[in-house]
Amino acid sequence: MLDLFSEEAPWQEPLADGAVILRRRAREEAPALMAAILAVAQQNPFYHRITPGGHRMSVAMTNCGDFGWSSDSRGYQYTEQDRESGRKWPPMPPLFRQLALDCAREAGFPHFNPDACLINRYEPGAKLSLHQDKDEKDLHQPIVSVSLGLPAVFQFGGFARGDATQRVLLEHGDVVVWGGPSRLRYHGILPLKPGDHPLAGAFRYNLTFRRAF
Ligand code: MD6
Ligand code: FE
């Protein structure tokens, strides 16, 4: 049950055509989501990947689902195995999948069928530079993004890297769904400010659900 006295009910905030923030949408599930993240990370730990350009990413990543996203000197790609551990990615927990489907449907994407979930972990100072998500085969499927733990400033831009960006704060339990005409917009995360979150400690976690193939 939502406790309407101590928590606000979720609400929707349009970002752009095809993109919406479902504020606080994942708050109720957050403790179970956090536990599932830690269970995935016990099997396939968070790593700081190296970009094709040779830089160590400040965000640490792991994945679950049939495919996982990572980068190394060969480039960015989705793989069935974690190239660090050599093992298959852990299955997507049913709770993850259900949340992603529900959020996609609420945002107007009833046919979303994710096969990959990238889990990002930000420590203070960690950031994600402006980028497009374009390594997925079917760009008609949206992306569902779930933020947990410390808040972060999300930059949401246009279709060229230099376009003006909106800045929005993403907080614990916020879900962003975007697809359609916004699917290839540039976006990023500004350096995380230090803090102490009751569930996530010194970190921000972000789950992004995608259809990779
Ligand atoms: C993050 N998110 O929130 C990074 N990509 O930590 C993303 O890069 C992202 O939130 C595609 C769609 C939604 C996202
Ligand atoms: Fe992205």
Image: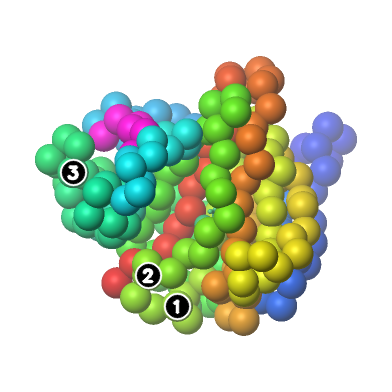
Q: How is the image coloured?
A: rainbow
Tell me which numbered mark, 1 or 3, is placed earlier along the sequence.
3
Residue 19 appears in the figure: no
Q: Position of residue 99 (x, y in %)?
A: 52, 55
Picture quadrant where residue 11 is located: bottom right
Mark 1, residue position: 139
Q: Residue at x 18, y 43 (%)?
A: 83
- Report how far apart the C-alphas of labels 3 and 2 lie in the structure: 19 Å
In what quadrant does ligand 1 lie?
A: bottom right
Q: Position of residue 3 (x, y in %)?
A: 77, 37
Tell me which numbered mark, 3 or 2, is placed earlier along the sequence.
3
Assess whether mark 2 and mark 1 are in contact (beta carbons under 8 angstroms): yes
Front residue of 37/164: it is 164
Mark 3, residue position: 83
| Relative to 166, residue 146 above or below | above
Q: Residue at x 43, y 69 (%)?
A: 134
Mark 3 Cα within 10 Å, few/some/many (few <14, many 20+)?
some
Residue 78 appears in the figure: yes
